[in-house]
Image: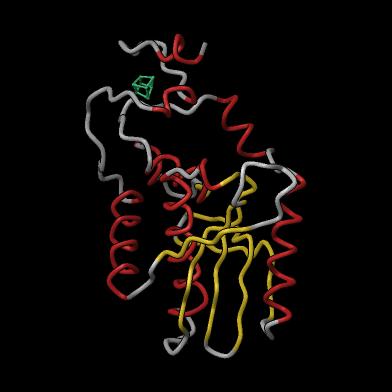
């Protein structure tokens, strides 16, 4: 977390969301997992984005796919943004099933919502816009299923202020996690070989 506030050091919103879900201050993301995050993109993902965009277009929305957003040195691309009049819908699309939900998905959507608000609403004083944010998952276990379920994250003024304070604290180098080794599911993505919990064994 220490490097996160470094000037000119770009941070991906997805990577930051993963960090927010990690409660161990010793966590060090393995190169292998970084590469996976950079390159992994299932074809199914793009199909799901296109299906959702089609749905919203049919409802009269204009849609933008992979919309770039940023705040200070955090940057990311929102899978889908649909807009009609003052209604703005942000969607983070997961090709995983709902059963695979994890907190970092929610953090990712929360970061994107704030980044969108900062770049397109606050900066242009478009304060009449109503922002809604969703994560879309496949509903069922079967690959054949086409059903999508959308979980809504409630966006309001307090939430946006909370996100701004949180991101500013992280970017300014404040510690938001404990000094201790705290094992969790994320250990499999960590390459600290000095960890008493032996992440390497968990990896194996
Ligand atoms: S393997 Fe050890 S250092 Fe890495 S996240 Fe887990 S507890 Fe923390």
Task: Point out residue 73 in the picture as x, y percentages from the top left corner.
Answer: 47, 54
Please report the residue visible at 34 percent of the width from the left and 74 percent of the height from the top. Answer: 156
| Total numbered labels | 0
Pick whichever, 161 or 173, lies toward us. Answer: 161
Quarter for ligand 1?
A: top left
Task: Point out residue 140 in the picture as x, y percentages from the top left corner.
Answer: 61, 47
Compared to residue 162, the image places residue 17 above or below, namely: above
Please report the residue visible at 31 percent of the width from the left and 30 percent of the height from the top. Answer: 24
Task: Point out residue 162 in the picture as x, y percentages from the top left corner.
Answer: 28, 63
Please report the residue visible at 56 percent of the width from the left and 55 percent of the height from the top. Answer: 76
Tell whether 59 sits left or right of 100.
right
Please report the residue visible at 47 percent of the width from the left and 80 percent of the height from the top. Answer: 121
Which quarter shows the N terminus? top left
Compared to residue 108, the image places residue 125 above or below, namely: below
Compared to residue 19, the image places residue 127 above or below, namely: below
Tell whether 121 sits left or right of 32.
left
Task: Point out residue 42 in the picture as x, y percentages from the top left corner.
Answer: 72, 43
When asked about the image quadrant of residue 85, the answer is bottom right
Pick whichever, 84 or 142, lies toward us. Answer: 142
Compared to residue 28, the image places residue 63 above or below, namely: below
Tell whether 140 sits left or right of 46.
left
């Amino acid at each position: 977390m220490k490097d996160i506030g470094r000037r000119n050091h770009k941070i991906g919103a997805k990577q930051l969301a993963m960090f927010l879900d990690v409660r161990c201050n010793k966590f060090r993301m393995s190169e292998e997992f970084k590469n996976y995050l950079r390159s992994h993109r299932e074809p199914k993902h793009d199909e799901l984005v296109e299906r959702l965009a089609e749905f919203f277009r049919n409802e009269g929305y204009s849609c933008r796919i992979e919309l770039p957003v940023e705040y200070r040195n955090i940057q990311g691309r929102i899978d889908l943004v649909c807009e009609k009049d003052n209604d703005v819908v942000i969607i983070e699309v997961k090709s995983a099933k709902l059963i695979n939900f994890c907190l970092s998905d929610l953090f990712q959507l929360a970061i994107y919502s704030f980044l969108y608000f900062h770049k397109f609403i606050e900066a242009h004083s478009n304060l009449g816009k109503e922002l809604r944010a969703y994560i879309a998952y496949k509903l069922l276990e079967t690959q054949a299923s086409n059903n999508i379920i959308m979980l809504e994250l409630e966006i309001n003024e307090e939430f946006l202020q909370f996100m701004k304070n949180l991101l500013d604290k992280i970017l300014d180098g404040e510690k938001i996690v404990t000094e201790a080794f705290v094992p969790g599911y994320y250990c499999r993505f960590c390459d600290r070989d000095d960890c008493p919990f032996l992440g390497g064994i968990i990896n194996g």
